[in-house]
Image (cartoon, rainbow, N blue to C red):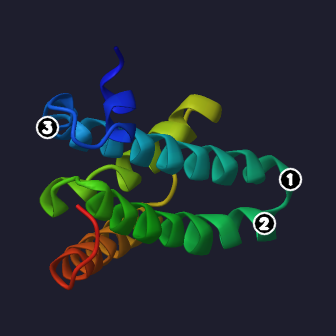
């Protein structure tokens, strides 16, 4: 049986086994979210300069903040949650266009992801999910 399905059957002994690997799913979801945001920003380069800059400097860092916060709330360690969004931004640009975006956008994404991971940890400590 797929481990995630055991989460729907409370009281089952297998729920503890499924909880051990919960962080892998949280990291995979965060990777998919960050890669989608990076690909959207990279594809906006072909549409218009305004859309590209708005997504690169506003959308992707905000998505990194929110995805890091949610990943920590889903069970990922806060020290790992902020690492994914900035490399996904660079990887998406390399895949689509063959060049990296500006370094400032990657640093802003990393910083806001760090803030989001810290906020997620605070929410977990205040009684959120984990």
| Location of residue 52 (image quadrant) | bottom right
Which residue lies at the image location 29% right of the left edge and 43% below the top edge?
A: 10
Q: Are marks 2 and 3 in contact (CB under 8 Å)?
A: no
Q: Are marks 2 and 1 in contact (CB under 8 Å)?
A: yes
The residue tagged 3 is 16
User: Within 10 Å of the Cα at label 3, are there few (<14), some (14-19), or many (20+) other Cα atoms?
Assistant: some
Is 22 in front, or is 53? 22
69 vs 46: above or below: below
The residue tagged 2 is 51
Is 129 in front, or is 68? 129
125 vs 38: above or below: below
The label shown at residue 88 is: none
The label shown at residue 47 is: 1
Q: Position of residue 107 (x, y in %)?
A: 35, 67
Q: Is residue 124 left or right of residue 30?
A: left
Determine the secondary structure under disc 3. Answer: helix
Which residue lies at the image location 39% right of the left edge and 29% below the top edge?
A: 5
Q: Earlier in the sequence, mark 3 or mark 1?
A: 3
């Amino acid at each position: 049986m797929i481990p995630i399905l055991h989460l729907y059957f409370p009281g089952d002994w297998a729920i503890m086994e499924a909880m051990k690997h919960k962080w892998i799913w949280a990291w995979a979801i965060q990777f998919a979210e960050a890669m989608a945001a990076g690909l959207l920003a990279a594809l906006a380069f072909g549409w218009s300069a305004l859309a590209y800059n708005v997504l690169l400097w506003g959308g992707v860092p905000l998505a990194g903040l929110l995805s890091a916060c949610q990943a920590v709330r889903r069970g990922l360690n806060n020290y790992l949650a902020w690492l994914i969004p900035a490399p996904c931004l660079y990887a998406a640009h390399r895949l689509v266009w063959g060049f990296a975006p500006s370094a400032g956008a990657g640093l802003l994404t990393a910083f806001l992801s760090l803030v989001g991971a810290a906020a997620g940890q605070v929410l977990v400590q205040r009684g959120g999910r984990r």
